[in-house]
Each structure stands twice: as C-alpha cells, then as structure tokens.
Amino acid sequence: MDYRINRRTGDKISVIGLGTSYIADAPEKEAIEALQYAHAHGINYADLATAGAKTFEYYGKALGNVRKEMFYQVHFGADYSKGEYGWSTDLGTVKRSIDFQLKALKTDYIDYGFIHCIDEEKDFFDYEQGGILQYLKDMKKQGVVRHIGLSSHTPPVANKILDLGIVDMFMFSINAGYDYQHGEFAKGSASERMELYKRCESEGIGISVMKPFSGGQLLDAKTSPFGEALTLYQCIQYALDKPGVLTVLPGISSVEDVKKLLKFFEVSPEERDYSVIGSFTPKDMTGTCVYCNHCQPCPMGLDIGLINKYYDLAQAGDEMARDHYQKLDVHAEDCVKCGHCESRCPFHVKQEARMEEIAEYFK
C-alpha cells in the first residue's frame, strides 16, 4: 500500500480507500470478511456515506477492535432513520443519525465530520441556518469530531465553503468523464475543476475521490464517452494524478472486490495509462498538461508530468512546490528539445516551450 499525508492534519492515508455505496447489500459475513481483508492489506480510510444502515453495523463488527488504525469520514446530513440513505438539513434528525452511527461503529469519535453533499448555495444556507454547521463545529470543540470535511459536486459552491477556512478534507467526484463534461455530475468546466484541485493542493486540503468509475459507466465500452472501456486501474491512476488527491474510494462488497483493487499496485504502467482520453479533450484543456506521463520515457530523464505539476502548483500559491521541484534529480533546463514528448502527448502540449518557461520561473 502507498500512503499520502494530509498536510492539514498529518494523517497518513492509504491511496486506495473504501467506498460504501453498496456494501450494505452484501451478506454480513461476506461484508465483514471484505472489511477485515482490506484493513489487513493496508487500507485505512473509509467513507461512510452509504446506501444502507447495515454498513455501520458491519464496520463496527469488522473493525471495532482496530478502530484507532482507521480513518472514518462521517457525513452530517446523511439520514438513516428509515434504514436507507436519506438527506436532511433538520438538526434533530442529523443528531439522531450521528448518535446511531457512532454506536453502530463502536466508536466515540469521528476522524472527519463532513458537511454533507452541498451542491447548491441554498443547500448550504439551509445547512447553516438550521444549526447543523454549528453542531458540527461544537462536536469538533468537544473532540468528538477531529477534523471537518466537505462533500460537493459543484466547484463554485465548493470554493465558497472552502473560503471559510474550516475544511481539512474535501470529497469530490473525479473521473475522466466528469472532468471532460460527460455524466450526471460533470459540473463545472474542465479548467474550473482543475483549478479546484490545484487550490486544494496549494492550501493543503486533502481530496478523497468519490465516483472514480462514473458509476461504472467508464468501465463499459457501451456507456463510456471515450468509445472504449477504461479499466479500474486507469481510472484510479487518473484520479491519483490530480493535484490534492490523497485517496480514491471505490465501492466494495466482497474480498474479491478488494483483491481486484489491490492489484493496482501490481499492474504495469501501460495498464494504468489513460492517454486514450486525449482524443476527447475539450477545447479549454487542449494544450494543458494533465500529468499523465504518456510522454515518458524522456531521453534526458525528465519527469515531465511532475515538473509541470510543481510549476502549476507554484503558480497557484503552493509554497512547497518550489522546494519539491528543486529536489528533482533532473530539471526543466536539462531539456534538449528532442521533441519526443511532444510527439507522444495526447493533449497536444508544447512541452519544449513549457520547459523553457518553467526553467525561467524556477531560476
């Protein structure tokens, strides 16, 4: 397992976590075995915005004795009073739901208490005016909630809440379909979405990724907007390459599901290569490096994707990006303009000019 650090909290988080969208549909024994197998193989982060209330009981039974080794993101606004997921901005309902979840999870604390599913400004107005935000803040003061998170599908709304300065973790739907304007939650232009990721990286706000497979649409050639199916591993790599991303949260319901995800660390770089999406790049992203590294290998040893990433982040205000760049073994000024990268780039980036620009910037 690989891990990434949330700079706001210091938490060391597995790059593959657990989504819980449909684990409640699994038989109890199978669900518990899957969760225990995931933990035993290094997965330590789980989202608990689930479809059914059984999920919490499964987690409590499977992981209650190793609770301190796990990070849970729990959503203030997700209602399970009827046994299935519901959304509520009623304070009493939210309090009862949180009490139920804590008891079922066999825990007395929440690692990341989430402002849940705010997609419109009115949603946040209701959330705030109804007292839920204050309740969440009070729970943090009491130590029950350790950090505050936010889930949203809408960049402008998310940015307004991030402006409050209280969010340490951000859950967002990241996949090649949504980023390039295909799918139900493809909100915001490609450039708006990328700027949001860069902001999170710059401010040290970790991103946990929901819907990495676009509800399974990207895994089927018949429903993929790219005309061919992507693999689990292409989708996971795509999300992990985005600025700010700490962990990707695919749904699981069996040990076999977990094993399939963990194979990500065994497959070749070619099996993770998602450059096929370059043929569908929208106009506002053509010529923009998305750090896919399809241009590799560079004859001079430049890590072109990482060099571009540190440059973009430095421009976005990330104070650590310059230091990260300087620590690279090979820098932009070492480019010999052989044209290899430009001939391979599916996004038509003029990397030779970029390397000149980047070398000048980091002088």
Image (tube, rainbow, N blue to C red):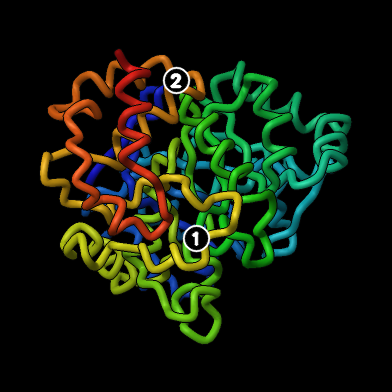
Compared to 279, does 86 lie above or below? above
Question: Image point 68% across, 37% down: which residue?
Answer: 158
Residue 29 visible to an observer of this rendering: no
What is the distance, in whole Å, between disc 1 and disc 2 at their CAs?
A: 25 Å
Residue 110 versus residue 129: which sits nearer the camera?
129
User: What residue does disc 1 label?
Assistant: 176
* Image spot of residue 117 (x, y percent): 69, 47
* Image spot of residue 74 (x, y percent): 57, 43
Question: Image point 50% across, 58% down: which residue?
Answer: 175
Compared to 178, does 112 lie above or below? above
* Image spot of residue 279 (x, y percent): 46, 67
Residue 310 visible to an observer of this rendering: yes
- Horizontally, is 260 left or right of 98 in the view? left
Query: Where is the C terminus found, in terms of image quarters?
Result: top left
- Horizontally, is 193 left or right of 156 in the view? left
Label 1: state its secondary structure. Answer: helix
- Horizontally, is 218 left or right of 354 in the view? right
Compared to 91, does 282 lie above or below? below
Quarter where residue 185 is shown: bottom right
Query: Callout 1: few (<14), some (14-19), or many (20+) C-alpha neighbours within 10 Å?
Result: many
Residue 48 versus residue 302: which sits nearer the camera?
302
Question: Image point 53% across, 69% down: which residue?
Answer: 22
Residue 113 versus residue 170: which sits nearer the camera?
170
Q: Amino acid under label 2?
A: Asp
Disc 1 and disc 2 in contact, CB within 8 angstroms? no
User: What residue does disc 2 label?
Assistant: 318
